[in-house]
Amino acid sequence: MTRHRGRGMASINYPIGMNLGGDPSQALVHSNPSGKFTVALSSIDLGQGMKSVTRQICAETLGVPVEDVYVDTADSDTGPHCMGSFASRGTHRVGNAVMAAAREARGVMMEAAAEELEVNAADLETDGRGNIHVKGAPHRSISTKDVAIAAQFKQGKTISGRGIFLVPLSDVDPETGEMSPATCYAHACLVAEVEVDDETGEVAMVRMDSAYELGRALNPRLVEQQLVGGAWMGVSHALYETPEPYYPDPVHGPRDFVEYLMPGPGDICPHDIAVLERPAPDGPFGGKGPGEMCANPVLPAVANAIFNAVGVRIDDLPITPEKVLRAIKAQGGARPQARR
Amino acid sequence: MTKIPLQFRHNGRDVAIFVDGGTNLLVALRELIGDMTPKFGCGQGGCGTCSVLIDGELHLSCLTLAETVAGRSVETLDGMKQGPNLHPLQRAFADNFAAQCGYCTPGMLMAAKALLDRNPSPSRTEVIEAISGNICRCTGYEPIINAILAAAGGRASA
């Protein structure tokens, strides 16, 4: 029995969003009389951090503290329309919609403040701590709360804004099939190192090194968290997870967590991540988003690493010990490839 | 069906409820006591998100018959906070971004508490072993392990 080490690499260009129907998402922003703001979305936060990122984007655009913004998501009965949380589109598409809505709401807020301070709205600025004051004269100031109260009870204004992200639908060229499904792309490269046991066919992860270019990381800790966890979803798809191992025959399909293989805390390996920030011109504050590509480069990198380790090329996922063993047997033993 | 009277300590407070024979502890906690911190994941002991401490020992509440905790002490995540202050483990989970979707978090915290209560300065391997019955579907094990180690370190130096 020998354990063979192998290293494999994969690079991807990953589209942010998609073409379907112009990929629209809407956002509505309004203040209540306490001077706090609510962002209404139908977009869903399923752990990727949509609520945190849209909250930051709204607060930054309005010029108010992040604590003063509440994000209300995921009710498609009452919220404005959203295509959904998929296609790595959340930060970029929904973020752009929130930014547009917050910009409009900020316009109303500044007009209302201008009326109270008896100045021109163009001469006002926000301090990011919940106050609006005359540029160069911080003492000529009013709190966003007092502005909201004045708008509600005196001026008869709603401090609110509407935002939508929509791109023109890209038609397919009838000659070439060419189209432009996305407005921007994120990029990644991942190197996986594995150890393949030629007696059992088992593949163990040794380490991963990756570089991700995803526009500006609007919330660097959430980005890192998503990349750490997402890479392991990729490993899981590469090595463990399958609903029907003998597709299409469902007889041996897993029925529960006990039979459905997933990585546990004991399977993880060191993963060194470099995040490169090149702000996207059409992204909210330059953000594109890690999204699905945190998992995707792992699969080909692991398959390549297995080839490098034992010389078998497996193109059917997941790469189970059985497939590795059969392939090694078919070629008459492990054939480690050159290591670079 | 006859209801069975059941008394036990729930996070330091005496509770008395009536349960149907065969009711599991998870259902008793969530539906009869209203403590929603233990989560229902798989209902068959495969995911660990329903973990609670019974007399200080880690148990899967979905596989525990409610009537077996009569007279015993049941701790859930709901009782982990000390007044207005987060437990050091909760603080460490927040500081280390150890929750993504959050569904595994209650079970992870209870498994971690069970570990630190009996072993205040565990090794990384011991931490991994302690949470190996808990599935994190966001696969965020790395920050969870780091958070538990940080909590243990903070406690040791405090």
Image (tube, rainbow, N blue to C red):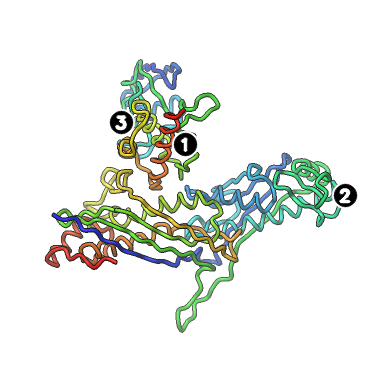
Q: Pointer 1 and pointer 2: residues touching (CB < 8 Å)?
A: no
Q: Which residue is mark 2?
A: A118
Q: Is residue B34 visible?
A: no
The local secondary structure at tag 1 comes to helix
Q: CA distance from mark 1 to mark 2?
A: 49 Å
Q: Residues within 10 Å of mark 2 (few under 14, many from 20)?
A: few
Q: Nearer the viewer, mark 3 or mark 2?
A: 2
**Residue type, numbered disc 2:** Glu
Q: Residues within 10 Å of mark 1 (few under 14, many from 20)?
A: many
Letter of the chain that mark 2 sits on in the rendering: A
Q: Residue sitting at 53 percent across and 28 percent down?
A: B85
Looking at the picture, tell me which residue is in the foreground, B91 or B79.
B91
Q: Which mark is residue B92?
A: 1
Q: Residue at x 43, y 40 (%)?
A: B103
Q: Residue furthest bottom?
A: A175
* Residues at marks 3 and 2, CA–CA distance in whole angstroms: 68 Å
Along the viewing direction, whichever of A18 and A284 lies nearer the viewer: A284
- Asked if marks 1 and 3 touch (Cβ < 8 Å), the reply is no
Quadrant in the rendering for residue A188: bottom left
Residue positioned most to the front: B157
Which part of the image, by quadrant, shows the N terminus of chain B? top left
Gap in angstroms between the C-alphas marked 1 and 3: 29 Å
Mark closer to the observer (1, 3): 1
User: Residue A283 location in percent, x, y?
Assistant: 58, 62
Q: Which one is earlier in the sequence, the residue at label 1 or at label 3?
A: 3
Q: Residue at x 85, y 55 (%)?
A: A120
Q: Position of residue A187 (x, y in %)?
A: 46, 65
Residue ID for mark 3: B63
In the depicted structure, whether residue A2 falls above or below residue B36: below
Q: Amino acid at mark 1?
A: Ala
Quarter holding residue A121: bottom right
Which chain letter matches label 1? B
